[in-house]
């Protein structure tokens, strides 16, 4: 769980830095630098994690790996859709030709717009997400309160005198309720998880 959170935080930090990095590369190309010189400028001017990843690309190219392969390795390591879009555009431009600075500017604009729209969606769906958490947590909090305040109140739920298939009826009812709550919580998460 901790590793997943760290990985997600690093990917979010990378994606937030990517539009400015792409703009920096485009400005370097307009100033007359080669693409590798623009990437070296990114390594010098930006902060981790993006400087580390582009630094690896420079290192791999210096060790003799073709630039397209080094860029593909970075896409495989980072697993960012925005980075994959940038790498695909650069690869196509190297094959077909064209003004790379303009292409990178349009990609940076697209990524910025996507980040802005995702922020708006998170703001608009915040109430629904919070409702899902409250609905999921409230029954457990109420059961804990009853268990502390009146321990004998929940005792009939576990009475083996009323049983279905050898289990107390209260346990089966609790299991069905827990399953229904879990399904409802997952449905709320799916409804408010909007792809951009």
Image (spheres, rainbow, N blue to C red):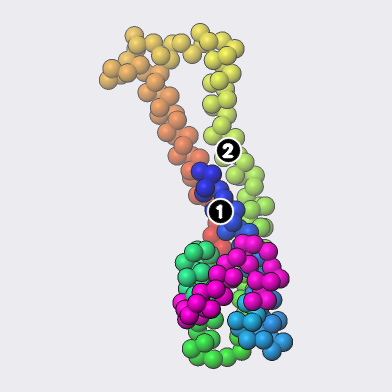
Q: How many marks?
A: 2
Quarter of the rendering occupied by the C terminus: bottom right
Residue designated by label 1: 8
Q: Nearer the viewer, residue 118 or 33?
A: 33
Residue 192, position in %: x, y? 56, 50
Residue 186 point in image, percent of width and height: 48, 43
Residue in the picture at 52% in, 87% down: 94
Q: Where is 73 relative to 154, above or below?
A: below
**x%, y% of residue 83?**
55, 70
For the residue labelled by badge 2, is the local secondary structure a helix, a strand or a loop?
helix
Q: Is residue 25 left or right of residue 62?
A: right
Q: Secondary structure at mark 1?
A: helix
Residue 166 is labelled as: none
Query: Residue 24 occupies which quadrant of the picture?
Result: bottom right
Q: Does 133 sit above or below residue 61?
A: above
188 vs 92: above or below: above
* Residue located at (50% from left, 40% from top): 185
Give how far apart the Cα atoms at labels 1 and 2 are: 21 Å
């Amino acid at each position: 769980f901790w590793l997943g959170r760290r990985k997600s935080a690093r990917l979010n930090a990378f994606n937030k830095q990517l539009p400015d990095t792409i703009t920096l590369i485009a400005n370097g190309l307009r100033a007359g630098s080669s693409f590798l010189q623009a990437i070296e400028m990114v390594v010098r001017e930006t902060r981790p994690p993006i400087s580390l990843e582009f630094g690896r690309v420079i290192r791999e190219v210096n060790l003799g790996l073709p630039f397209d392969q080094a860029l593909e390795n970075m896409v495989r390591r980072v697993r960012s859709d925005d980075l994959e879009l940038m790498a695909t555009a650069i690869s196509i431009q190297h094959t077909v030709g064209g003004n790379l600075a303009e292409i990178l500017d349009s990609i940076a604009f697209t990524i910025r717009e996507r980040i802005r729209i995702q922020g708006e969606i998170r703001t608009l769906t915040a109430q629904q997400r919070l409702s899902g958490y409250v609905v999921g947590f409230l029954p457990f909090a109420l059961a804990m309160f009853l268990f502390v305040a009146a321990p004998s109140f929940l005792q009939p739920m576990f009475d083996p005198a009323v049983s279905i298939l050898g289990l107390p009826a209260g346990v089966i009812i609790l299991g069905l309720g827990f399953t229904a709550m879990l399904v409802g919580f997952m449905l709320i998460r799916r409804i408010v998880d909007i792809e951009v």
